[in-house]
Image (spheres, rainbow, N blue to C red):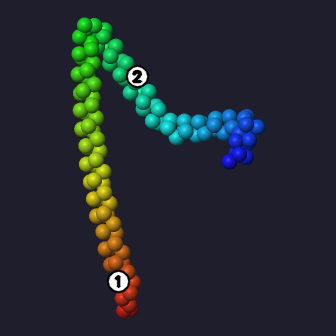
Amino acid sequence: METIWSFIHSHQFAVIAVIAVALIIIYFLFKNLIKLALLFVLILILTGSYFYFTAPRKSPEDLTKAIKKTQEQAGQMIDKGKDAYDKSKEIIVKGKEITDSVSKVISKDKEVPRKE
């Protein structure tokens, strides 16, 4: 353990380089998530500014309504996604059953000698 601490203290540039590489790797792993979060923030800012410019006194009320509506629609989309996932699992299971039955029929055909 002491050798690790002495290495860190004596090779600070290497530690900084390793941390920089780790941060870059983390960035590329979460790049799409970061883009999605930035897009959400941009949409939130645009919606808030729209409500502010159209009716400055009503904008906080309208903004809370918009946020609630967005949360409801996001919940509905999650439910639809779960339903689609469940249906796709059922389809995959049925496909495997069909493939297994077809492979059994094909293997039976190969075992039966043909008359020529």
Horizontal placement of 54 versus 37: left or right?
left
Does 29 sit above or below residue 70?
Answer: below
State the residue at coordinates (42%, 32%).
Answer: 36
Q: Report helix, strand or loop for mark 2.
A: helix
Q: Is residue 95 visible?
A: yes
Residue 71, compared with residue 115, is above or below; it is above
**Residue drawn 30% across and 10% down?**
52
Amino acid type of the residue tagged 1 in the rendering:
Lys
CB within 8 Å, label 1 to label 2: no
Q: Is residue 51 above or below residue 106?
A: above
Asked if residue 115 lies left or right of residue 90, the reply is right
Kindly indicate the quadrant of the structure image that contains residue 26. top right
Disc 1 marks which residue? 108
- Can residue 14 be seen here? The reply is no
* Residue, far right: 10
- Label 1 packing within 10 angstroms: few (<14), some (14-19), many (20+): few
Q: Residues within 10 Å of mark 2 (few under 14, many from 20)?
A: few
Indicate the secondary structure of the residue bearing disc 1: helix
Q: Residue at x 36, y 18 (%)?
A: 46
Q: Which quadrant of the figure has residue 44?
A: top left
Q: CA distance from mark 1 to mark 2?
A: 62 Å
Tell us which disc is closer to us: 1 or 2: 2
Residue type, numbered disc 2? Leu
Q: Is residue 62 left or right of residue 2?
A: left
- Residue at 31% x, 8% y is 53
82 vs 12, nearest the viewer: 12
State the count of labels.
2
Where residue 58 appears, x then y in whole percent?
A: 23, 11
Q: Which residue is mark 2?
A: 42
Give the percent coordinates (x, y) of residue 41.
Answer: 40, 24
- 16 or 75: nearer the viewer: 16
Sooner in the amino-acid sequence: mark 1 or mark 2: 2
